[in-house]
Image: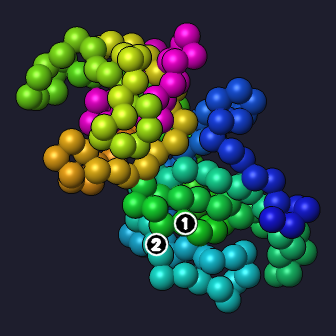
Amino acid sequence: CSKDCQPVVARALVTGVSPAMAIMRVKSRDIGPHYYETLFLRSSINPEQWSDESVRHGEEVTLLAKMAAADDSTGGQTEFVLVRAASGAQGWVKAEFLEPTTAALVVKCRDIAPRFDEAIFLRAQLNPDLWSQATVRDGEVVTAVTVARSPGLEGQLEDFVFIVTADGTEGWVKRKFLQPAVGKE
């Protein structure tokens, strides 16, 4: 990174930066006449350096870094954000194409088949064999920090969210067990 680049590390987000900034949602519709369902990522903030990677409107991405660059057309600054999609795709987008997601989520495991449990174990890492002794209970409000895609128990790719509980417990949980905590913040 250059001196103007301000990296944001997921761990730092837990303690120093608002967790709402860790996970962003792509908003490519209604921004301009040429942006629809898919937004291509840039390999750098240079307008000519596009990558083959893309993200879709409404997709959640993890914020990795921010950088402001001179905008010759306006004489001002344009803010760029380095993001990583759950698929692993990584690249730069203009900040105007992102919006914060709800960082507060509520655990919903009692109604999820096949087990209908009152609590679920957290993963210590994104590895189906590395479980933590920590659990989260149905109805518990947690903070989302980052998203990723990893093999589930049966080897199929699933979306996971790294969460932090009110008491500081951390771990990975399948996205299907989380819902926005509307009205609970």
Where in the figure is residue 102, as x and y percent of width and height? Answer: 50, 34
Q: Residues within 10 Å of mark 2 (few under 14, many from 20)?
A: some
The CA span between labels 1 and 2 is 8 Å
Examine the image and state in which quarter residue 41 appears.
bottom right
Q: Position of residue 94 (x, y in %)?
A: 66, 66
Residue for point 47% across, 21% down: 142
Say the numbered circle drawn on residue 54: 2
Label 1: how many residues lie within 10 Å, few (<14), some (14-19) or many (20+)?
many
Specify whether 45 is left or right of 148: right
Please tell me which residue is depicted at 52% across the width and 42% down the height of the picture.
Answer: 146
From the image, tell me which residue sits under label 1: 90
Give, as a single range, the part of the protein colored magenta: 162-184
Type of the residue with mark 2 = Ser
**Residue 158, placed above or below residue 117:** below
Residue 37 in sight here: yes
Q: Amino acid at mark 1?
A: Gln
**SS at mark 2 in the image:** strand
Q: Secondary structure at mark 1?
A: strand
The outermost residue toward the left is: 114
